[in-house]
C-alpha cells in the first residue's frame, strides 16, 4: 500500500466540555465540518472525559472521516495532556482511572453545561463530575496511564502559558515519555521551535483545540501515512517505514 498525505485535527471538543459551544458542538456538526474541510482524521478530546466519543464515531460512519477516541486530561499541576487511544476499550479504562482521581461536582450555571449526545444530536444525559477541574494525578502518572491503556500521550498547546506544560512547569521533564507535543492554532510550528528550542527533540503537531464548529480545522497537521488509522499515526510520530509528520496549516 502506497503512502498518501492526509489532514488531521487531533484536538476537538464536543458539547461535553463545559467551555465548548454546548448546543452547536454536536456529533453531526463536528463530522460535517471535518468532512467539508477534507480532514481525514480527527480526535475527540473533551476535558477529562471520552463519553461523547462513540456518538461522534457513529455519526462519522460512511463519511470518510476517521474519529479517534481521546480525552484532554488535566494533571494535578494543571497541565493538559492529550490521550489518543487505539481502541475504545483502552479509552474506557483510562476514563475509569480518571473518574477515580477527579474530585468535584459540576455547577452548570458556574462552570458550564456538560452535555452527552447520541449520533443524531439528541441529548441523552449530562455529566455531573467537574470536568473543568484538575485530577489528583501528577503529569508523570497521566502519561504512564495513557501508555498503559494503549494510548499516545501528547502535551497540549505547549506554546500557551495557561495549561501548557512549559507554562505550568517551566520545562518539559527529561524523564517524561511523551509521544509528541502539540502547538496551538495561534502559533506556527516554525515559530514554536524558534521560541522554545527545547521542543526540537519531539514530533510537533498542530491542532485546532476547537470548542465551536467554526474553530474546527483552524489548525491541522499533514501526515504521510498509508491510511488514516491510529497505528499509522503512531508510526508517523516515530518516523517509521516512511511515515512522518509533514507540517500543517
Image (cartoon, rainbow, N blue to C red):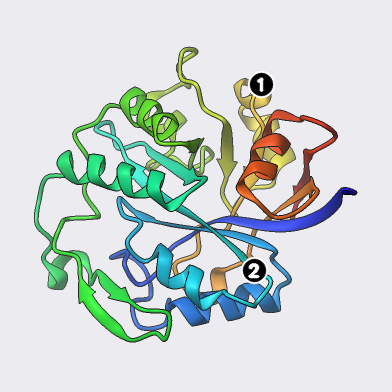
Tag 2–tag 1 contact (CB < 8 Å): no
Q: Which residue is mark 2?
A: 65
The residue at the point 52 percent across, 75 percent down is 30
**Cα distance, mark 2 to mark 1?**
30 Å
Give the image location of residue 165, x and y in percent: 43, 32
Identify the mark nearer the N-term, 2 or 1. Answer: 2
Q: Between residues 19 and 144, which one lies in front from this camera angle?
A: 144
Give the image location of residue 198, x and y in percent: 61, 20
Residue 59 image label? none
Disc 2 crowd, CA 10 A, few/some/many (<14, 14-19, 20+)? many
Q: Quadrant of residue 109?
A: bottom left
Image quarter (top left, top right, bottom left or bottom right) of the C terminus: bottom right
Mark closer to the observer (2, 1): 2
Q: Which residue is mark 1?
A: 201
Q: Between residues 109 and 126, which one lies in front from this camera angle?
A: 126
Residue 121 visible in the displayed image? yes
Residue 134 visible in the displayed image? no
Which element carries disc 1, helix, strand or loop? helix
Give the image location of residue 209, x and y in percent: 50, 57
Disc 1 crowd, CA 10 A, few/some/many (<14, 14-19, 20+)? few
The residue at the point 30 percent across, 50 percent down is 48
Which element carries disc 2, helix, strand or loop? loop
Whether 207 is drawn above or below 244: the answer is below
- Residue placed furthest toward the top: 175
The residue at the point 34 percent across, 31 percent down is 142
* 225 relative position to 180: left or right: right
Q: How many numbered marks appear? A: 2
Whether 247 is drawn above or below 146: the answer is below
The residue at the point 56 percent across, 49 percent down is 184
* 212 relative position to 23: left or right: right
Q: Quadrant of residue 49?
A: bottom left
Amino acid at each position: 500500500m502506497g503512502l498518501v498525505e492526509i489532514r488531521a485535527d487531533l484536538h476537538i471538543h464536543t458539547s461535553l466540555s463545559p467551555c465548548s459551544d454546548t448546543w452547536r458542538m454536536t456529533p453531526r456538526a463536528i463530522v460535517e465540518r471535518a468532512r467539508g474541510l477534507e480532514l481525514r482524521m480527527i480526535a475527540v478530546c473533551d476535558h477529562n472525559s471520552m463519553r461523547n466519543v462513540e456518538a461522534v464515531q457513529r455519526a462519522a460512519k460512511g463519511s470518510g472521516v476517521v474519529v479517534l477516541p481521546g480525552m484532554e486530561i488535566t494533571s494535578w499541576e494543571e497541565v493538559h495532556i492529550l490521550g489518543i487511544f487505539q481502541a475504545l476499550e483502552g479509552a474506557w479504562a483510562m476514563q475509569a482511572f480518571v473518574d477515580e482521581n477527579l474530585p468535584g461536582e459540576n455547577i452548570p450555571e458556574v462552570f458550564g453545561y456538560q452535555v452527552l449526545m447520541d449520533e443524531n444530536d439528541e441529548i441523552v444525559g449530562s455529566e455531573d463530575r467537574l470536568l473543568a477541574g484538575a485530577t489528583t494525578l501528577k503529569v508523570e502518572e497521566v502519561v504512564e496511564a495513557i501508555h498503559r491503556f494503549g494510548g499516545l500521550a501528547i502535551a497540549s498547546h505547549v506554546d500557551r502559558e495557561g495549561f501548557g506544560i512549559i507554562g505550568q512547569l517551566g520545562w518539559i521533564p527529561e524523564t517524561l515519555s511523551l509521544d509528541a507535543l502539540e502547538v496551538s492554532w495561534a502559533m506556527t510550528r516554525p515559530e514554536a521551535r524558534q521560541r522554545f528550542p527545547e521542543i526540537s527533540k519531539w514530533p510537533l503537531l498542530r491542532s485546532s483545540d476547537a470548542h465551536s464548529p467554526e474553530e474546527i480545522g483552524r489548525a491541522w497537521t499533514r501526515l504521510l501515512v498509508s491510511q488514516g488509522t491510529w497505528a499509522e499515526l503512531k508510526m508517523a510520530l516515530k518516523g517509521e517505514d516512511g511515515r512522518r509528520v509533514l507540517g500543517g496549516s
